[in-house]
Image (spheres, rainbow, N blue to C red):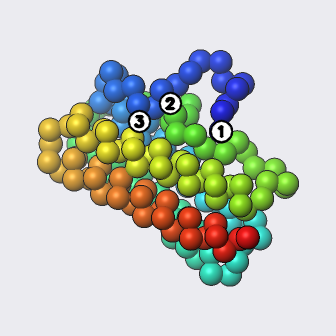
Amino acid sequence: MNREKDSSPFDLFNFEVSLQELLGRAVRTELEEADIYRNLLEKDLPDETAPIIERFITQEENHEEKLRSTFDDFFPDEEIPLPERSGVEVPEETSGETTPRKIIEEAIEAERNAEKFYRELIDEFEDKEVRRLLGFLASNEREHYEILRVELNKLK
């Protein structure tokens, strides 16, 4: 999904910025993904899908906390720089006409982009714990992607 009203292109995969900025992008990514799922919960979903989406919200919030903690470990006296948006393509604010199918399709794309971002971000850190955290986050994003594909097929 393109955000044509945003005149300045934002490249999520531009790693030629500070580690602070990269961690800020990662936090923003988690915030945006949690918002996607909150919007999805407002839609008419199959009964078995809602608990999955609620779990995703909790996981995204936990990821955000872990990333903030990592930032604090590296930069204890600094405030995390949160960009206006992450660069992961996320759905615009949903309207009453936005279908669960459309939101899930866009969430799938967001999860794929987030997984790629975390996998590529691993190379920016030498610290084993941070690399392990980023690998964990990438794996979680992949898991969300796979589960969302199954849920999408239930919507017909």
Specify which label sits upstream in the sequence, 1 or 3.
1
| Quarter that holds the C terminus | bottom right
Q: CA distance from mark 3 to mark 2?
A: 7 Å
Which numbered tag is attached to residue 83? 2
Residue bearing the label numbered 1: 1
Kindly identify the amino acid type of the residue bearing the numbered disc 1: Met
Q: Residues within 10 Å of mark 3 (few under 14, many from 20)?
A: many
Residue 79 visible in this rendered orientation of the protein:
no
Asked if disc 3 and disc 2 are in contact, CB closer than 8 Å, the reply is yes
Q: Residues within 10 Å of mark 1 (few under 14, many from 20)?
A: few
Q: Residue at x 28, y 53 (%)?
A: 135
Identify the element where label 3 is drawn: helix
Judged by depth in the image, the label closer to the viewer, 2 or 1, is 1
Residue bearing the label numbered 3: 24
Q: Residue at x 30, y 38 (%)?
A: 121
Q: Residue at x 15, y 42 (%)?
A: 127
Q: Residue 80 placed where, x, y %? A: 39, 34
Number of numbered discs present?
A: 3
Kindly identify the amino acid type of the residue bearing the numbered disc 2: Pro
Kindly identify the amino acid type of the residue bearing the numbered disc 3: Gly
Q: Residue 77 placed where, x, y %? A: 28, 32
Q: Residues within 10 Å of mark 2 (few under 14, many from 20)?
A: some
